[in-house]
Amino acid sequence: MTPVLELDRVSFAYRGSAAPVVEDVSLTVADGQSLALVGESGAGKTTLLRLLLGLTRPTSGTVRFGGDELRLGDRELMRRFRRGVQCVFQDPYSSLDPRRRIGSIVAEPLRSLGLETRHTAGPRVAAALERVGLPADAAERYPHEFSGGQRQRVAIARATVCEPRVLLADEPVSALDVTTRVAVVELLNELKREQGLTLVMVSHDLSVVASLCERTAVLENGRVVEEGDTARVLGAPAHPYTTRLVESVPRLPGPRD
């Protein structure tokens, strides 16, 4: 089966830089599968996400969507790509325009992709807000009227309103408190089951990775050093760097500690 997203020996270096940010990375993401990209800050996780989003061109190698090379000049392909791949960002407040009502924010992908107009988007916006557990009057309110967790639900509604195949998430719960984080993780799991979403997620939180993703790729200095089933990678790591990541997770002391 053709992967929905694929990185084939991809490298990326900033102009004038001697060292690449990511180097010789090959990853495949199948339909309905979820993949976590983990590693320390500066490992190249967000750069890979930008490459998968088509926001950055690789210095070498190929990014493919549905088997087709992602060519930014191919308008038809990029139209299919923009409808099929959406993103949720880390900070739910800065990613939402404070001057616009929630209904207008969530409808933006529908309008920009030509799927609905401002006058016809209402029912799909209402359904998207309902799916993420927001009240019926949310569409008429502004971002500052919501909590951080509710704003992230708005961001998820915006990303899923056009029913994409793939959701790319950059630290989607790191800006939230623990209780809210659990609720948003449960929401993402529910959307995965109900909509068959493919999820690619960058995260420092290995507990979130274990809850959401079947596969995990571990990055160190721009290279994938380990990849496989999440339970195996986190439970019995084969690479010393992965072992250090797992051992660095804070744990509550036991009754005898």
Image (cartoon, grey):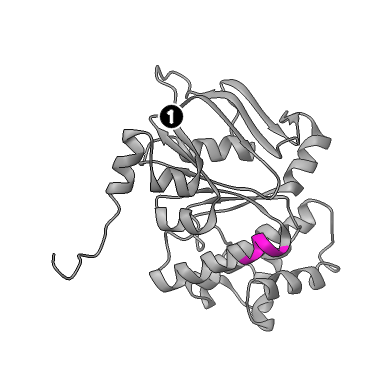
Where does the magenta region start and end? 190-194
Residue at 40% x, 16% y is 18
Observer-nearest of 253 and 209: 253
Residue at 84% x, 60% y is 116
Residue at 73% x, 45% y is 82
Quadrant of the frame with the N terminus: top right
Residues packed near mark 1 inside 10 Å, few (<14), some (14 to 19) or many (20 plus): many
Q: Secondary structure at mark 1?
A: loop
Q: Is residue 1 above or below residue 165?
A: above
Quadrant of the frame with the C terminus: bottom left
- What residue is disc 1 on? 222
Residue 64 position in % (x across, y down): 69, 31
Q: Is residue 55 visible?
A: no
- Residue at the far left in the pictured view: 257
Q: Is residue 90 above or below residue 4?
A: below
Residue 57 position in % (x across, y down): 60, 28
Observer-nearest of 137 and 21: 21
Residue 208 position in % (x across, y down): 45, 58
Within the magenta stretch, is there residue 193?
Answer: yes
Observer-nearest of 102 and 161: 161
Within the magenta stretch, is there residue 120?
Answer: no
The secondary structure making up most of the magenta span is helix
Q: Is residue 56 above or below residue 81?
A: above
Residue 204 position in % (x across, y down): 40, 50
* Apparent side of residue 159 relative to residue 204 in the rendered image (left or right): right
What amino acid is labelled 1 in the image?
Gly
Q: Is residue 5 visible?
A: yes
When asked about the image quadrant of residue 233, the answer is: top left
* Apparent side of residue 26 relative to residue 251 in the rendered image (left or right): right
